[in-house]
């Protein structure tokens, strides 16, 4: 009987203690059930994904923007509320603000990187010339490819390419020189009287002449501003390749004769799919080589000969 009374008394005492712990509280004390450790919030307001997964993704991995235009990239961060920061690999070509808005300044390409919570995501952005925007134009890919490689430059602060402009001899030798990695010429003096040391094509002319790619005129001039004819362009590339003999002797161009100095060059370039010609079966060797044609020749050379 005494043992039973003792058990009841102990139970009443424990109940009284629990009630006091819940009801009685001092200032700032918690009223209610005990807090579990897993419920503690990040004091900085950052809530981690219960699954433990943390990721950062962009809505685009590749994008095109015309110079002067903008595009806003969207970042999706899971597992954290941390703010996303943005960075352009070349702020001269394209800028990006804190909201992921990219502004194209110059033609070329940049990588836009978003970073947050130790994660990063990238988008490769091609910055298009204002006058080269149609992907169906045959010169669209060559122009962007060679601009990205630094082979060709544009006008108006690198915002226009002017594909219909005529390509000069100075531009042609410079494009070839850049395509080959801007090799240093062996000599420092240019033998052409009309090529000055402060000309952008000075080193290119010396190198081109050293390697028997370009020849001057009998009066000792190079004629840098003379428009490059189609026959000149194909001959320069043939010489660049080492004057290889074409495998075929069949000439598909009605206006190219065996006695022409550019005969082998034309057949070789056609074989290598550098030169296509016109629908009427002509090459038009005396025609002006336009900038859009030149970049296409160079692009095909780099793909089919340099195997880039």
Image (tube, rainbow, N blue to C red):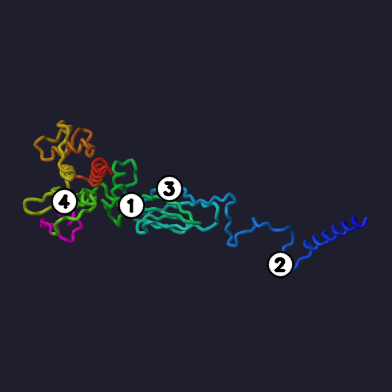
Residue 206, percent across and down? 15, 54
Asked whether 197 falls inside the magenta stretch, the response is yes
**Disc 4 and disc 1 in contact, CB within 8 angstroms:** no
Total tally of numbered discs in the picture: 4
Task: Give the label, 1 or 2, closer to the camera.
Answer: 2
Residue 115, percent across and down? 47, 56
Which residue does the numbered mark 2 point to in the structure image? 28
Q: CA distance from mark 1 to mark 3?
A: 17 Å
Q: Could you tell me which secondary element the residue under label 4 belongs to?
A: helix
Q: Which mark is residue 61?
A: 3
Which residue does the numbered mark 1 point to in the structure image? 108
Of pointers 4 and 2, the one earlier in the residue sequence: 2
**9 left or right, relative to 60:** right
The magenta stretch spans which residues?
A: 189-208
Q: CA distance from mark 4 to mark 2?
A: 84 Å
Q: CA distance from mark 1 to mark 2?
A: 61 Å
Few, some or many residues within 10 Å of mark 1 (<14, 14–19, 20+) = many
């Amino acid at each position: 009987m005494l043992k039973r009374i003792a058990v009841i008394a102990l139970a009443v005492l424990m109940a009284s203690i629990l009630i006091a712990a819940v009801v009685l509280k001092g200032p700032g004390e918690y009223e209610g059930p005990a807090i579990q450790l897993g419920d503690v919030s990040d004091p900085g307001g950052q809530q981690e994904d219960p699954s433990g997964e943390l990721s950062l993704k962009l809505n685009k991995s590749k994008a095109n923007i015309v110079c002067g235009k903008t595009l806003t990239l969207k970042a999706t961060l899971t597992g954290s509320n941390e703010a996303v920061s943005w960075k352009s690999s070349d702020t001269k070509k394209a800028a990006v603000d804190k909201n992921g808005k990219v502004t194209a300044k110059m033609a070329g390409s940049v990588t836009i990187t978003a970073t947050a919570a130790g994660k990063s995501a990238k988008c490769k952005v091609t910055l298009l010339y204002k006058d080269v925007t149609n992907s169906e134009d045959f010169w669209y890919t060559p122009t962007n490819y060679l601009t990205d490689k630094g082979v060709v430059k544009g006008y108006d602060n690198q915002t226009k390419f002017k594909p219909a402009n005529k390509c000069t001899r100075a531009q042609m030798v410079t494009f070839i020189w850049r395509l080959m990695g801007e090799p240093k010429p062996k000599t420092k003096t240019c033998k052409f009287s009309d090529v000055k040391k402060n000309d952008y094509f000075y080193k290119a002319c010396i190198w081109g002449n050293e390697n028997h790619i370009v020849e001057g005129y009998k009066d000792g001039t190079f004629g840098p501003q003379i428009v490059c004819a189609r026959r000149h362009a194909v001959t320069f590339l043939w010489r660049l390749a080492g004057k290889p003999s074409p495998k075929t002797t069949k000439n598909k161009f009605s206006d190219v004769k065996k006695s022409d100095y550019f005969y082998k060059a034309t057949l070789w370039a056609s074989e290598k799919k550098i030169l296509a010609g016109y629908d009427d079966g002509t090459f038009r060797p005396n025609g002006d080589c336009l900038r859009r044609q030149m970049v296409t020749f160079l692009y095909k050379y780099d793909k089919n000969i340099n195997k880039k």
